[in-house]
Image: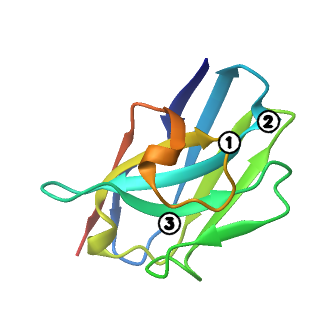
Amino acid sequence: QVQLVESGGGLVQAGGSLRLSCAASGRTFSNYVMGWFRQAPGLEREFVATINWSGGDTYYADSVKGRFTISRDNAKNTVYLQMNSLKPEDTAIYYCAASNSWRTVTPSQYNYWGQGTQVTVSS
């Protein structure tokens, strides 16, 4: 089992920045690919970004490419999502998740999920 706890969400004006954190406990953190997803009201859960086991490779959704940066610190068992140039359409609950598969964008391929953190971007 892997337990994931997100933090760092909040209310920000358009153009602003937030950094989300996801702290992991349980099994060896570096054994897992980590991802960030988001879900807005009435919409399906959407892939945002993923990072491989070592942190040496990343992959982003087109909608966030160039604005968001995913990173991880295996010594701290934490994955981050730096979000810059935020837009109102980025408003959603953001979830981190752990997978055994690299570069997968499908929620069903992720085995463990956090409880989510709300990000609200005002116009």
Residue at the left extreme? 42
Query: Is residue 121 rendered to the left or right of residue 77?
Result: left
Query: Is residue 2 rendered to the left or right of residue 33?
Result: left
Q: Are marks 1 and 2 in contact (CB under 8 Å)?
A: yes
Residue 12 position, x and y percent, is 35, 61
In front of the other: 17 or 64: 64
Q: Earlier in the sequence, mark 3 or mark 1?
A: 3
Which mark, by number, is residue 17? 3
Residue 18 position, x and y percent, is 50, 58
Tag 1: residue type? Asn
Q: Secondary structure at mark 2?
A: helix
In front of the other: 14 or 117: 117
Where 121 sits versus 71, above or below? below
Please name the residue that numbered disc 1 is placed on.
100
In front of the other: 122 or 115: 115
Q: Which of labels 3 and 1 is toward the front?
A: 1
In front of the other: 104 or 118: 104
Q: Residue at x 58, y 72 (%)?
A: 60
Tag 2: residue type? Asn
Mark 3 to mark 2: distance in Å?
30 Å
Total numbered circles = 3
Please name the residue that numbered disc 2 is placed on.
31
Where 74 sits versus 123, above or below? above
- Quadrant into which the N terminus falls: top right
Q: Secondary structure at mark 1?
A: loop
Q: Residue at x 85, y 62 (%)?
A: 56
Where 16 sits versus 92, above or below? below
